[in-house]
Image (cartoon, rainbow, N blue to C red):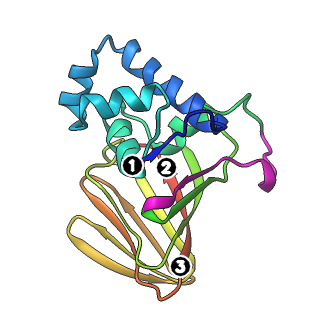
Amino acid sequence: MREVEDGGERDPVDVRLAERLAELRADRGWSLDELARRSGVSRSTLSRAERGEISPTTSLLGKLCAVHGRTLSQLLSEVEAAPAQLVRAADQTVWTDAAAGFVRRSVSPPYAGLRADVVESRLAAGADIAYEAPPVPGMEQHVWVLDGTVEFTAAGTAHELRAGDCLRLRLWGPTRFRCLGPDGARYAVVVVLP
């Protein structure tokens, strides 16, 4: 997690994300203690994330998405402005977890009620991102490597994917993305809800 500096300019996406995380918990009538129990994230971390004192990591957002039954694409689309059919590259939401070496671009225009999203991800050389569970069990993913080499592990099986390779599967358990680089990797993920 990145600390938000006092007096510093806060990222508008992080501000809206903090507000949305608090709303999701309140909508379910959960206390911070209950959300901590369900997510495995400490109460203090959840509180700081909801107040916008920290910028949440990929891992933290993955755990919260799983608890709330939504994908990261859905969560980030909920903090977007008004939905549009076309979003130019310069206007697509980019979220960065610098400590993990991960950059995520929401390619699909955010639109509630649709089942598929396209996401572009970048991993720095050596980056390793793990998710304990899919946000929606049984969701379908297509992982298409555009540049570099990514090792994607699901159901205990590691798949080494190089530029041009595409893996299609349904997610039921933990997953992991590792950049085998010496250089970074860029890949697209198509997420399809059941």
Q: How many marks?
A: 3
| Residue 114 appears in view | no
Q: Residue at coordinates 66% horizontally, 35% vertically from top-left?
A: 12
Given the image, on which type of amino acid does mark 2 rest?
Answer: Val
Q: Relative to 124, is 106 above or below? A: above
Q: 137 or 147, which lies in front?
A: 147
Q: 35 or 115, which lies in front?
A: 35
Disc 1: which residue:
139
The earlier-in-sequence mark between 2 and 3 is 3
- Label 3: few (<14), some or many (≥20) within 10 Å? some
Residue 97 at x, y = what percent?
49, 55
Disc 3: which residue:
184
Given the image, on which type of amino acid does mark 3 rest?
Answer: Gly
Q: Residue at coordinates 53% horizontally, 77% vertically from top-left?
A: 185
Q: Are marks 2 and 1 in contact (CB under 8 Å)?
A: yes
Disc 2: which residue:
192
Residue 152 at x, y = what percent?
36, 72
At numbered mark 3, what does the secondary structure look like: helix, strand or loop? loop
Mark 2 or mark 3, which is nearer to you?
3
User: Quadrant of residue 115 in the image?
Assistant: top right
Given the image, on which type of amino acid does mark 1 rest?
Answer: Met
Q: Are marks 1 and 3 in contact (CB under 8 Å)?
A: no
What residue range appears in magenta? 85-99
